[in-house]
Image (tube, rainbow, N blue to C red):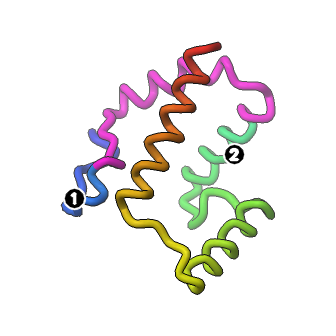
Amino acid sequence: MRFWQASTRPELLWYIAVMTRTEAMTIITAKLASLDDERVQAVAEIIEDIAAGDGMVRQLTAAELALVEQSKADFKAGRTLSIDEARARTDAFLAQRRALRTQK
């Protein structure tokens, strides 16, 4: 069973990740023990919410809600990125995260 299917929208293809249930369970099992208590609790709450079939997995934090409002203002003011600009920023961010992870 695959969790994600390929998008028919070419601009979204770089976001698509295909993973089997077994692969997902292996990753979860391998990473769970390294999390602190707070994050383990967060994972448990997310899983309970998903299993309950409720709409939103969790409530947004105040900081996340502020970012949503900021993005709405940015759109209204025309402050947006092209898909290439967004991709470049995302790629740079992910490269930085990978570099930090390999330093540990």
**What amino acid does circle 1 point to?**
Pro
At a point 61% along the width and 57% down the height, the residue shown is 57
Quarter of image, res 59: bottom right
> In screen coordinates, is 42 left or right of 102?
right
Task: Magenta stretch: give its range.
Answer: 14-40
Report the quarter where the C terminus lies.
Answer: top right
**Residue 21, magenta (yes or no):** yes
Disc number for residue 10: 1
Name above or below for residue 94 compared with residue 52: above
User: Residue 13: x percent and y percent?
Assistant: 27, 51
N-term-proximal mark, 1 vs 2: 1
**What amino acid does circle 2 point to?**
Glu
User: Residue 92: x percent and y percent?
Assistant: 49, 40
User: Residue 99: x percent and y percent?
Assistant: 54, 23
| Badge 1 density bin: few <14, some 14–19, many ≥20, Cα 10 Å | few
At a point 67% along the width and 58% down the height, the residue shown is 58
Say which of 62 and 45 sits in front: 62
Name above or below for residue 32 compared with residue 76: above
Helix, strand or loop under label 2: helix
Reading the image, the residue beneath label 2 is 45
Quarter of image, res 69: bottom right
**CA–CA distance in space, label 1 to label 2:** 34 Å
Q: Nearer the viewer, mark 1 or mark 2?
A: 1
Report the quarter where the N terminus lies.
Answer: top left
User: Residue 53: x percent and y percent?
Assistant: 54, 60
Say which of 92 and 57 sits in front: 92
> In screen coordinates, is 30 left or right of 13?
right
- Dominant secondary structure, magenta: helix
Name above or below for residue 33 compared with residue 95: above
Say which of 84 and 37 sits in front: 84
**Residue 22, magenta (yes or no):** yes
